[in-house]
Amino acid sequence: MRLTPFFALLFAALAFGLTACGDDDDDGGGDQPQVFEIEVNEEGVTAPETAKPGALEVRFSNTGKRDHSAQIIALDGHTPEETIKAGEAWGEGGGELPEWIRFAGGVGTTKGGGAGTAVVDLEPGDYAVFDIDSDADDAFAAFTVEGDEGGELPDTDE
């Protein structure tokens, strides 16, 4: 299952508005975002099954040899498989992208052995992280955001 045709175009168009990248040494001040580690390789995607609402520092590791990525999408009552099917109908079939597909951030294409970070702000609900560059059957990992409010987004100098 290759997800690239659907997600690559949309991810490229939205990537700058959905991610806030930095290195691990950035001092955000205030409450620190919770760490959410995602590992991707040729076998698939692994991620925690749960997270707290609020700011998450996504720490992405590509432990594979090929390029991989991580895009978080709110499922809003749909399954990851339905999301893939709708995306393929849009990307490959020329249909409209359903309004229920809501991108929540992520880390773009990263070379084998590489890593990246992003800070995202997630509300309670069901999500999945997709590897848009994968051929693996398990090119996603579903997770739930629930519980007490976690950390806040770091302050910026703006």
Image (tube, rainbow, N blue to C red):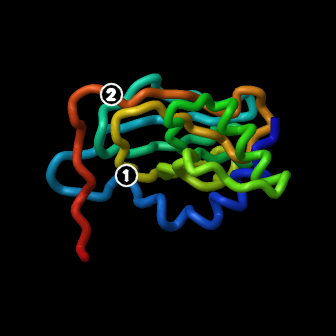
The percent position of residue 95, horizontal first and vertical second, equals 77, 54
Q: Residues within 10 Å of mark 1 (few under 14, many from 20)?
A: few
Q: Residue furthest bottom?
A: 158
Is residue 80 visible in the rendered image? The answer is: yes
Q: Residue furthest left?
A: 30
Q: Are marks 2 and 1 in contact (CB under 8 Å)?
A: no
* Mark positioned earlier in the residue sequence (2 or 1): 1
Whether residue 145 sits left or right of residue 46 in the image: it is left
Looking at the image, residue 16 lies above or below residue 109: below
Name the amino acid, label 2.
Glu
Occupied quadrant, residue 50 = top left
Looking at the image, residue 15 lies above or below residue 36: below
Occupied quadrant, residue 141 = top right
Image mark for residue 137:
none
Residue placed under numbered mark 1 in the picture? 24
Name the amino acid, label 1.
Asp
Residue placed under numbered mark 2 in the picture? 146
The percent position of residue 114, horizontal first and vertical second, equals 61, 49
Q: Which residue is pictured at 71% across the width and 42% down the height?
A: 86
User: Is residue 29 or residue 78 the one in the foreground?
Assistant: 78
The percent position of residue 84, horizontal first and vertical second, equals 71, 38
Q: Which residue is pictured at 17% across the width and 46% down the height?
A: 31
Whether residue 4 sits left or right of residue 104 in the image: it is right
In the picture, the quarter occupied by the N terminus is top right
The percent position of residue 121, horizontal first and vertical second, equals 35, 48
Whether residue 155 sits left or right of residue 136 in the image: it is left
Numbered marks: total: 2
Q: Residues within 10 Å of mark 2 (few under 14, many from 20)?
A: some
Which element type, helix, strand or loop, lies under badge 1?
loop
Q: Residue furthest top?
A: 49
Which element type, helix, strand or loop, lies under badge 2?
loop
Q: Which residue is pictured at 46% across the width and 51% down the height?
A: 117
